[in-house]
Image: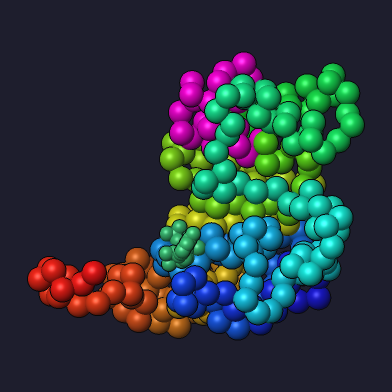
Amino acid sequence: MKNAYVEINNLSFARKERAIYENVSLKIPRGKITAVMGPSGTGKTTLLRLIAAQLHPDKGSVLVDGVDIHKANRSALYETRKKIGMLFQSGALFSDMSVYENVAFPLEEHTDLSEDIIKDIVLMKLQSVGLRGAIGLMPSELSGGMARRVALARAIALDPELVLYDEPFAGQDPISKGVLVELIQKLNKAVGITSVLVSHDVEESLSISDHVCILSGGSVVAQGSPEEIKASNDERVVQFLNGQADGPVPFHFPSGSFQSDLMGDSN
Ligand SMILES: Nc1ncnc2c1ncn2[C@@H]1O[C@H](COP(=O)(O)OP(=O)(O)OP(=O)(O)O)[C@@H](O)[C@H]1O
């Protein structure tokens, strides 16, 4: 792939001695939608955090638009981070700020724009997620799905070049899900944003992505176009796409024997 926006080289990352990634290399194509899928607990959110420089690899490098973000100096890191919009599961809204203030926050932090222009941008971003009417509400007055869409409006407030979406469809009704799918595609087609989408929604992910990457057991088990992935003979891919509990991908988090846990042997 010649034109990658994110390039991950020989990345290793462990949590409490448990390897999450071992020597993984992966490219995210520029201006495309890449879906990252894989079993629960495999490290998809961790991958997004490594790309956003919220976590640091034990080995290897992550280049974002050519910048090695784990080696970059403060100002280069700051500039690169401004180009990244994040919609993370834990990325809650500031509860003591209104919807307007939440979406305006990155604009006030990172730009010198006037209050009038900021207001227009906030209205535009809320309009694009279908929530212009919620501008005066507090987060406690929003449903979970609405809060997620406000968080998306905030994530795209600075017109990022790369947007990392962690489970954007979780908790969305079919209409809001449709709005989000359209928005992700629109951002990609109209403005050329590079998108990385982590989702358990196999159908939705395959239908909107240009590139798919399936992770399992600390490595990339398959990548390619949605058509190539659907045609894959790799048994781990087939098991994952078909949602089968039995197969080479374990369903359980690594553990000792069930019997000894029940007998109270484990600590
Ligand atoms: N703060 C943490 N401290 C220790 N281990 C963690 C921490 N966060 C995540 N992990 C572990 O890292 C592994 C990968 O977690 P991650 O959230 O990246 O998985 P995931 O693929 O996004 O899962 P899911 O699809 O269920 O959201 C898991 O085994 C998890 O237990």
Q: Residue 109, percent across and down? A: 79, 35
Left-right relation of 3 to 186:
right
User: Can residue 258 be seen?
Assistant: no
Left-right relation of 259 to 58:
left
Is 246 part of what is drawn in magenta? no
Q: Residue 137, percent across and down? A: 57, 18
Left-right relation of 261 to 157:
left
Q: Residue 88, percent across and down? A: 57, 48
Query: Is 97 or 208 nearer to us in this picture?
Result: 97
The relative height of residue 189 versus residue 177 in the rendered view (above or below) is below
Q: Main secondary structure of the magenta part?
A: helix
- What's the residue at 44%, 36% (across, down)? 173
**What residue range appears in magenta?**
131-153
Q: Residue furthest front?
A: 267
Rendering quarter of residue 257: bottom left
Query: Is 221 or 208 nearer to us in this picture?
Result: 221
Is 138 part of what is drawn in magenta? yes
Rendering quarter of residue 112: top right
- What's the residue at 58%, 24% (across, down)? 96
